[in-house]
Amino acid sequence: MQTRLLQEQRFSKLTPQAEKWEEDLPEKYDLQQPTAPKLIRVNEINDTWMEIPRYENIAWHGMWVISILSILSLFTYCSLFQFSEFYSEASVDSKIFILVAIFSFLSIFLFFFKMALFVPRGTPVRFNRKRQKVYVYEHQRSIWPWMRWPTVIKVFDWTDIHGEMLMYSGRYDYGHRLSCAVCQRGTYEVIDRFLLSYTVGDNRMIRGLWNHCCLYMQYKPVPETPLLTRKPLSWTPLNTVRWPEDLDKESKTAPE
């Protein structure tokens, strides 16, 4: 019985295995993938480069609601002490508690305010088949809102990338994701990972997107019309994706 259970266990060929891993996707150069190529979303596709946006499954309008509620709570909290003698008569421990509470309200407000106003929508991944490079636009945010949230562009060789499907089963995030694992050349030792698609319900969409990228990078014919065309709202120019000039040019052109 124990032997049979061990045989039924499935593991990724990639090391370390991704959290919430479900299966390794076919190798990039396998032309007989079982799912037809399909795009979920696309910003641009031409003979040189293709850009795929990544929209997170987040209710962005809720960020505004929480930030407003947190700052109103802070004003209410401070007003209570402004019109009473409690703070001046409080013990040292009570004063510390009050200051910690005020700092917490400010931190919550700042976090959700930055999320709503400054986080780019649809951070993209560009595939340049002339250079055989992949350019990943990453906005690195932290749970600590007082820190700077920088934008980093990661550049990888397409030959080092392997596809894997992840499965999320949370109450508010149920479905599959397409993860790309970047390995050391000629090995399955993972040195980095990035998501190419956030959660979708149908795993055939994930397999189709991976096949589409594989065929595109091999100059094979692929569909250019995405399944989804509607773009989520972006309220201000501060949410706009801004590529560094040199990498923007490099990722859109063929090598000289």
Image: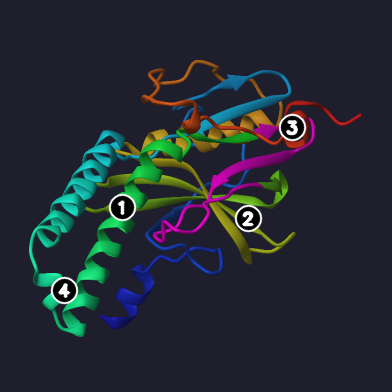
- Magenta-colored span: 127-153
Q: Residue at x 43, y 26 (%)?
A: 236
Q: Amino acid at mark 1?
A: Tyr
Distance (Cα) linking label 3 and label 4: 55 Å
Q: Please report whichever mark, 1 or 3, sits nearer to the chain's N-terminal start.
A: 1
Task: Say which quadrant the N terminus sits in.
Answer: bottom left
- Label 4: which secondary element: helix
- Badge nearest the viewer, 4 or 2: 4
Residue 245: assigned label: 3
Q: Is residue 171 above or below residue 129?
A: below
Does the CB distance between marks 4 and 2 fall below 8 Å? no
Mark 2 surroundings: few (<14), some (14-19) or many (≥20) residues within 10 A: many
Distance (Cα) linking label 1 and label 3: 36 Å
Name the residue that disc number 1 marks.
Answer: 168
Query: Can you give x and y, in whole percent of width and height, for residue 177 in the image?
Result: 40, 45
Between residues 162 and 93, which one lies in front from this camera angle? 93
Residue 88: assigned label: 4
Q: Please report whichever mark, 2 or 3, sits nearer to the chain's N-terminal start.
A: 2
Q: Amino acid at mark 3?
A: Glu
Name the residue that disc number 2 marks.
Answer: 182
Query: Can you give x and y, in whole percent of width and height, for residue 163 in the image?
Result: 54, 48
- Label 1: which secondary element: strand
Task: Say which quadrant the C terminus sits in.
Answer: top right
Which quadrant of the structure image shows residue 247? top right
Q: Please report whichever mark, 4 or 1, sits nearer to the chain's N-terminal start.
A: 4
Q: Amino acid at mark 2?
A: Val
Distance (Cα) linking label 4 and label 2: 58 Å
